[in-house]
Amino acid sequence: MKYLIFLGILTIGFSISSLPENRTLKPVEISQQLSAEFVNPPSSYRPGAFWCWLNGNMTTTSITRDLEAMKSKGMNRAEIWDVAAIRNPSFIPAGAEFLGDESVRLIKHAISEGKRLKMSIGIVASSGWNAGGSWVTPDWASKNLYCSKVEVSGPQVLTIDLPFPKFPEGCPMKDQHTPVFYKDVSVLAVPYDEKKKINDVAQVKSLTPFFKNGKLEWNVPEGKWTILRFVCSNNGQRLIVPSPNSNGLFIDFFDPNATIRHLQYFMDRLGVTPENSSEAGLGYFEFDSMELAEGTPWTDLFPSIFKERRGYDLERYLPVLAGWDISNCSDRFRYDFKETVSDQLIYSHYQTGTEFLKKYHAELVSESGGPGPPVWETCPVDALKALGTVSVPRGEFWIQHRNMFLIKEVSSAAHIYGKKIVDAESFTTWRRWKDSPFKLKKAVDRAFCEGLNNITFHTFASTNPEDGLPGRTYHAGYDMNPGTTWWSKSKPFMDYLSRCSYLLQQGLFVADACYYYGDQTPNFFPFFHDVPEKPRIKGLGNGYDFDVVNTDVILNRMSVKDGRLVLPDGMSYSILMLPDQVQMTMEVLEKIMNLVKAGATVVGPRPETVPGLKDWEKKNIALNRLSAELWGASDGQKIFEHNYGKGKIIWGIAADQVLSKKSIEPDFSFTGTSPIDYIHRTTEMGEIYFLSNESEKTVNTIGKFRVKGKYPEIWDPSTGAISRVAAYTQAKRATSFEIELPPHGSTFVVFNNTRRSKMAALTDLKKGAKETTISGPWKVSFPPNWGAPPSVVFDQLISWTASENTGIKYFSGTAVYHNSFKLSDGAGKKTIMLNLGDLRDVAEVFVNGKSAGILWKKPYQVDISQLVQPGTNDLQIEIVNLWINRITGDMLLDPKDRFCKTNQSYMTSEIWPGGDEPFRIQTAGLLGPVTLIEK
C-alpha cells in the first residue's frame, strides 16, 4: 500500500480530550497532547517577522493595523526594526529619530498592543544594524589599531614629533590630523628592511618609555631604523541603513561596558527597569550579523586582555599587525591575536549582552555566527561559540542569492550548547514579487532538514492603504505583509510553518557523528560560505546526520557514557570526526585522549603541531609524544585503527564505514535515486522524522527507518491531519513501508510508543477512483482598476500571459473562475476530491458558495465531499498570482498610467548571477486540467 502524503487525503481518527494538570502524563496522554498541539500549535511556535519601520515613519494607527494583520494570519512575533528605505526614499517621508521622544512613544504603543494581542514584541538593537546610535560618543565607539612610520638613521640623538597614522574617513576628528579620541598604544623601532622582514623578535625595540605628548626622544643606535607609532582610535564605522534621522557610530564591540551602556540606553529611554521588566512586554533584543570595519580591531584595554588570555605581552609583536614578518613568530602570533579577538568579542558583546538582558527578563537573539567569507570578510569569531553564547541563535537563508544558506552551523550551535530554538532570518531575497509560497516551501523545507525550527520572516514592511500596492518595501525582503497579493490566503502557509516548527522543537536532534571544525579563528561551517545545497562532511554518507562541534564544547561539555560521546543537555554521538589538518592545541588532544580512554571512537588524522606562540616548541614535543601514544602504529594507509583504553582511534577509513562496522545502519534510507532529505528528533513520545522530496517529480519509494518496536503514523503539516500506517515491515533494527511524496512534498513520520489502533489508517484514494474532467468554457472575472476587463471567457485554460489582452497578460491579483459540474444522486456516499491540476500561484475553492480550502502547494487538491449536492454544483476558484506581472507591464507605461505604487525600483539587470534576474512576466492563472475524483 502506498501512503500518499498530500493535502486532503489524510483524516484524523481520534478525538482530543483535555488533560489533567499537575500529574505525570501517561504515554497515551502524551500522544494526545502532542497531536492536539500539532493541529493547532501554541502561539510561541508561530512565525515572527522583522517588522520594518521604514524611514522611522510610523503612526499608532499603522502599528495597530500591522499587529492585528499579523495575528489574523497566524503570526505571533514582531521585531521592531527602524530602518532606511534605501530604494526611492522620497516615497516614504522621514520619521522621528530612533529612540527620540516620538519614537519612544510609538515603541511603547507597539509593546502595549503586543500585550493586548498576546504577541511577542522584540526590537533590533539599533536603527539599521549593527549596535550603535546617535548616543554613542567616540570614547565608547568602535575602534581599530593604526600605525604610522618614520625612517631614521643612527647614531644620533633624536628628538622628533611622530606623526599620527592616517585615519579612515568618518573617524571623528578635532582637526585635520587629530582624532577626537585616541590612545597611544606603543612606539617601536625595527631595523629597516625594504621587504619588511625582521629576523628575530629581539630586534624589536620598545621606544614607548621615550615617547610623551607626541614627541620621541631617543638615542638612535647605528644603522637605519623604522619607527612605528601604534595608535588606537575610532574607525568611524556607522550604522548600516539607519533611518534618515538616526545615524550614529557603532559601539566598541570589544568593551563589555560599551554593550552594557548601549542596552542600558534602550532600557532608560523605554522606562524599563529590572523591577518592572516582567510586565514591560519587551521580549527580546536582536543583534544582527557582525560586519566590522576593515583593519585591525582594537579596544583600549586590548594589551592587558591579550596578556591575560595568552600569557605574554604582545608589544614586540605589533609590527606583524602592520604587515611586518618576524621569523618563526608571525603565523603563531596571528593565531593568538585572532583567538583573542574572537574570545573578547564573544565575551564583551554576546555574553555580556545576554547576561545584561536576563536582568530585564529579556532574551538576546543574534546572528552572531556569520556568514563568513566571501559574504562577510570581517566577522572575526568562532561562530559556534558566538552562537552558543546568546539566548537564541539565529541564522539566515536567502532565495537564490549568493547561495546564502546559514542554517546547519546555527542548528549545530543550538544542539551542542543546549538551546531549544534554531531561528533564522527567513526568505531574504532581492527577487521582488517573483516567488510563490510553493517556491518558499522548497527553501524552508531544506532549512528544516538542516535543523531550523523557528521562522522569522525577512520582512514584514509596514505599509499604509494610501501608499497603494504593493506599497512600502524593504529593499532585500520577501514582503510578507498585506501588500502581497496572496496575504489574504496566507494562513494555511503560516500553519504549515507553525506545525513544522512545533514538531521540530520537540525532544532532541538525532545525530551519529560530531565533527570538530578545528581551532582556527575566524571559523565557520562551512568556512567558505557558498552552499547551494545542504552542507555535508566528507566520508559521512547520506542517512547519517551530524553536528559540528568546537574546542569549547570538546573541552568543557563533552564526556563519554556507554561508548557514546555525550553532552550535558542530552545530545549524544557515536563518533567524533577530526578535521583534515595537522594542528591541534595540546588541551584538545589531552581531552581527546581522555575521551578515547573512556570509550569514545575518534576518526581522523594524527596532529603534528600546536598553534600559538607561547612555549610552542615544548608543547610540540608533548603533543607528538601524546599523539604517538594515542594513534599508535596507525598511519591512515596500511594500519587504520588503534585501540586505546576502552575506545579507539581510526585513521584512513570513511566515517560511514566506521559506523557500519559498529553495526549502526543509516538512520533513514530509501529505494531509488530521487533526492529525499530528512531530519530526526527523538522524544519521550517516540521518534519524529521530517521527510522532504527535493525533486520536481513525485517520488514513490520504500522508506527504511532505524526504529523498531514502535508504531508509524503520518502527520501532515499542511493540514494537521494524522493517520496511522497500516502496512509496514519491522526487521531487527528497522521499520519500512511504502511512501509517495508529491513534487517538493513533505511530511512527518512519527513512530509512536503507543499503538493507536482506533485511528483511521491512511488510504490511497486514487485506487479504484473515477476521474472526470471539468471542461470549459470558464468565465473569469477580474477586479476593477487593475487593467484587465471585468470578465472574459476561456474556452480552454491558459496562462494569463498567453492572452492577447494586455490587461490580462500583465494582470496581478485575484481573478475568479466560474463553472459548474453535475453529480449523481449517490454522490453523498462517496469521497469526492477536486484536483486543479497546475496553477500559479495560490487558489481558494468555493463549492456552492462555501470555501473548501486554500491550495498553495502541489498537489492542488481538496476534499469537497461535505460541500457537494446531487445534481448541479456551482464552482468558483479564486486564483492569485504575484505582483511581478503587473509591475513588468507598468515598466512599459508612462509613469502616470502605472497601476502599482511602491518605493521599490524596477529591476532591469541581474544583481547577482543565478537568481536575481530582471523583472519579466511569469506564468499565471488556473492551468488545469481540473478533475473530480470520486471513490
Image (tube, grey):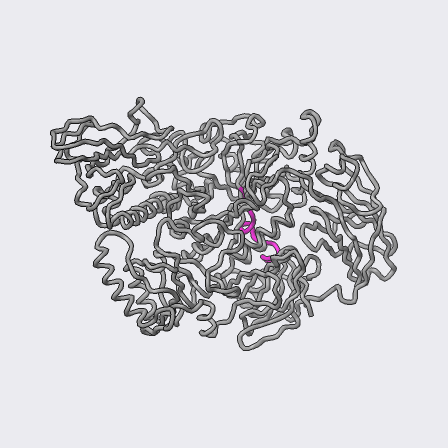
Can you give x and y, in whole percent of width and height, for residue 595 in the image? Answer: 34, 67
Q: Say which of 759 and 662 sits in front.
A: 662
* Quadrant of the rendering where the C terminus is positioned: bottom right
Could you say which quadrant of the image residue 783 lies in?
A: top right
Q: Tag count in the figure?
A: 0
Against 404, residue 465 (above or below) is above
**Camera-side residue: 322 or 542?**
322
Does the image show residue 683?
A: no
Residue at 59% x, 59% y is: 692
In the rendered image, residue 833, in percent from the top left (x then y), is placed at: 76, 58
In the image, taking residue 668 as reference, residue 279 lies left or right, namely left
Is 42 one of the magenta-colored residues? Answer: yes
Asked if residue 712 is among those painted magenta in the image, a careful observer would answer no
Image quadrant of residue 897? top right
Identify which residue, 345 or 756, lies in the foreground. 345
Nearest the viewer among 618 and 561 is: 618
Q: Up-down: is 250 above or below 696?
A: above
| Quarter of the rendering occupied by the N terminus | bottom right
Residue pushed farthest front? 194
Residue lying furthest bottom: 732
Q: Is residue 151 visible?
A: yes
Q: Give the range drawn in magenta.
A: 36-49
* Image position, residue 862 (x, y; %): 73, 55
Residue 597, image x, y percentages: 32, 71
Instruction: Say left or right for 103 vs 150.
Output: right
